[in-house]
Amino acid sequence: MVNLSVEIAGVKLKNPVMPASGTFGSGMMYSQFIDLSKLGAVVVKGVSLAPWDGNPACRVAEATSGMLNSIGLQNPGAEAFLDTDLPFLKRFGTKVIVNICGHSIEEYEAVAQRFKAEPVDMLELNISCPNVAQGGIAFGTDAKLVEKCVSAVKLKSRQPVIAKLSPNVTDITEIARAAEAGGADAISLVNTLLGMKIDIKKRAPVLGNAYGGLSGPAIMPVAVRMTHQVSRAVKLPIIGMGGIASAEDAVEFMMAGATAIAVGTANFKNPKVMIDIIKGIEDFMKETGVDDVNDFRKMLS
Amino acid sequence: MRMFSAEVFANKPVANGVWEMRIQAPADVLAESSPGQFLHVSVGDERHVLPRPLSICRIDKGAGRIRLVYRVVGAGTAYFAKMKPGESLKAMGPCGNGFFLEVGEKALLVGGGVGIPPLLFLAEKLKEENPGAFITAVLGYRSTSFLKEEFTKACDEVFICSDDGSEGFLGNSADFLQFKLAGSSRAKGIISQETVMFSCGPREMLKRIAGFAMLQQMPCQVSVEERMACGAGVCLGCPVKVKSGDGWKNMRVCKDGPVFQAGEIIW
Ligand SMILES: Cc1cc2nc3c(=O)[nH]c(=O)nc-3n(C[C@H](O)[C@H](O)[C@H](O)COP(=O)(O)OP(=O)(O)OC[C@H]3O[C@@H](n4cnc5c(N)ncnc54)[C@H](O)[C@@H]3O)c2cc1C
Ligand SMILES: Cc1cc2nc3c(=O)[nH]c(=O)nc-3n(C[C@H](O)[C@H](O)[C@H](O)COP(=O)(O)O)c2cc1C
């Protein structure tokens, strides 16, 4: 028997595989295809305090080995999530990680506060949201703001806090250190890379919002590099993601230094892909004589 | 809704740039399918991460087959057009909410381009539910028509339009409704509040059909298109603005639609 379980900030996951926020809803739709209790955790789509309408259509476009999205964090708000989605998820006995977003530090704090007494296992802070007070720049690209936001949320929350980093920065280690200084319990990375696609016949951007986030296999080498850099810069456990579509991809992230991994875009083509990845990691461990999934982190020569 | 592998039974061009593919699908997928629903079909290579939505054109329960009729517009549909009988593709479906089968005495089906295929399944289903119903179809093509014989069999009258005038009325199906059908004496009984309209086609056309239906006070369902990622209501990538109270809200084309009441949509 090989060990697949990992621990992040004191929370034990039965395996290192979970969905990436926003690509799995709250698990309800995809539960008709996969048994949610088999996953290491379920990470739900971004939840804000009040409902957000999101961006205008068109919100998705394909790119070579990837996609762009500009959903704009459409979500029905924390109350709706607590009324319907959370009770549903709790039926599966799986760990629940709630991805939270806000337009200001006060909004992030308010969401964290709202979840304080609720049965969720961790909060993931999406600091890639536009910061309205600062003229729309993303929180996650300014180290001082990252530290401030993380420490403010930490004060209001009972659950461990994961800071989710944006790759759209010059030095990812600077941001990771700021999150660590703010008191983050773990780091997840990467969010999407800002991109654009133009319809040359219409002479117009494809996305209604012009710019959108690039995800999928196209970004994987960037994400693996950043995982590697951050794992050497901070002591916090890392949830790695960006383009994972197979067990081999997942192992690559773990060798780069990730304790756990998340699967996003690949769910759209195959909603069962995470189950295949869990099985594939186990098979790979048996084939290569690795007893503990946690050993991958220490292997890189 | 299921995820399944399907073997291609036949795949051939039926008009300029338009192909017809018959796939062998599981019995439960056939049993669940209703007109207006679609399959989310994966492109079988790694470079294309998003499946392509294609409407169910017809099902053949006896043979266990689903027919898809598609226009080659980009890499995904070009990939489908290269598939040979015996090869297999992966799909999810049936997806979404199809047409609500309001089976009155009269139905008016209005299709444009590759919005025409799902109306064939609909015509057959409406006849099955009410054999006495009078079904009129107005079909608008770019140029050469396709599926014409089958519509002729399934419907009581069929009007063909083409953008280039190569067949039937010169103009699109919305033009035909507005300038021809509404005025012709034969159509008197069709353009009435007792007739239910069903439409599928490009957005600009649907918008005009919705306006026509509103003016004539006819009930009208439309099947709309939007770019989508998951096809299952998960990612919120395919919003459509619908009226809600005094304002509006986003609904999902893939899950809440693709069929909506024309009067609900904010165009
Ligand atoms: C519910 C629904 C049913 C449809 N049924 C049919 C049908 O029966 N026959 C048919 O020919 N076409 C149909 N379409 C349109 C069809 O999905 C697109 O033509 C197809 O996805 C184009 O893929 P591509 O790779 O060839 O083109 P590309 O332009 O290379 O595609 C790039 C991306 O854009 C998306 N895309 C491009 N055009 C459209 C479009 N018009 N609507 C939605 N997404 C698009 C693709 O899915 C892909 O993700 C339907 C669309 C929807 C939403
Ligand atoms: C459609 C879509 C919606 C997303 N929504 C969120 C979100 O709500 N919150 C968040 O932190 N990240 C969101 N992301 C980013 C993913 O969680 C993930 O970081 C990114 O897509 C990279 O992983 P992937 O290449 O496996 O998709 C979204 C990504 C996609 C494609």
Image (tube, coloured by chain):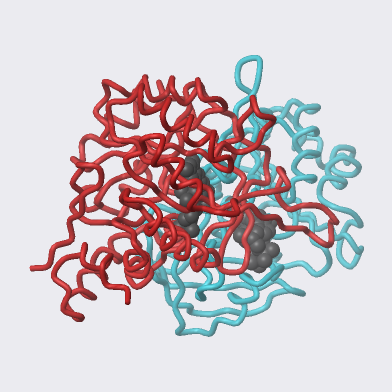
Chain colours: A red, B cyan
- The answer to whether residue B151 shows anywhere in this view is no
Could you say which quadrant of the image residue B187 lies in?
top right
Is A61 left, or right, of A186 in this rendering? Answer: right
A205, above or below A284, in the image: above
Q: What residue lies at 63% left-to-right and 70% top-to-bottom?
A: B77
Q: What residue lies at 34% left-to-right and 32% top-to-bottom?
A: A85
Q: What residue lies at 43% left-to-right and 19% top-to-bottom?
A: A110
Residue A194, position in %: x, y?
Answer: 63, 52
Q: B58 or A163: which is nearer to us?
A: A163
Is B145 left, or right, of A273 in this rendering? Answer: right
Tally of marks: 0
Residue B103, position in %: x, y?
Answer: 55, 37
Residue A124, position in %: x, y?
Answer: 39, 38
- In the current view of this chain or complex, which residue is farthest to the left? A1
B245, above or below A45, in the image: above
Q: What residue lies at 42% left-to-right and 72% top-to-bottom?
A: B6
Residue B121, position in %: x, y?
Answer: 56, 55
Is A237 left, or right, of A268 in this rendering? Answer: left
Could you say which quadrant of the image residue A246 lies in?
bottom left
- The answer to whether residue B214 shows anywhere in this view is yes
Q: A36 or B178: which is nearer to us?
A: A36
Could you say which quadrant of the image residue B222 lies in?
top right
Q: Quadrant of the C terminus of chain A?
A: bottom left
Q: Quadrant of the N terminus of chain A?
A: bottom left
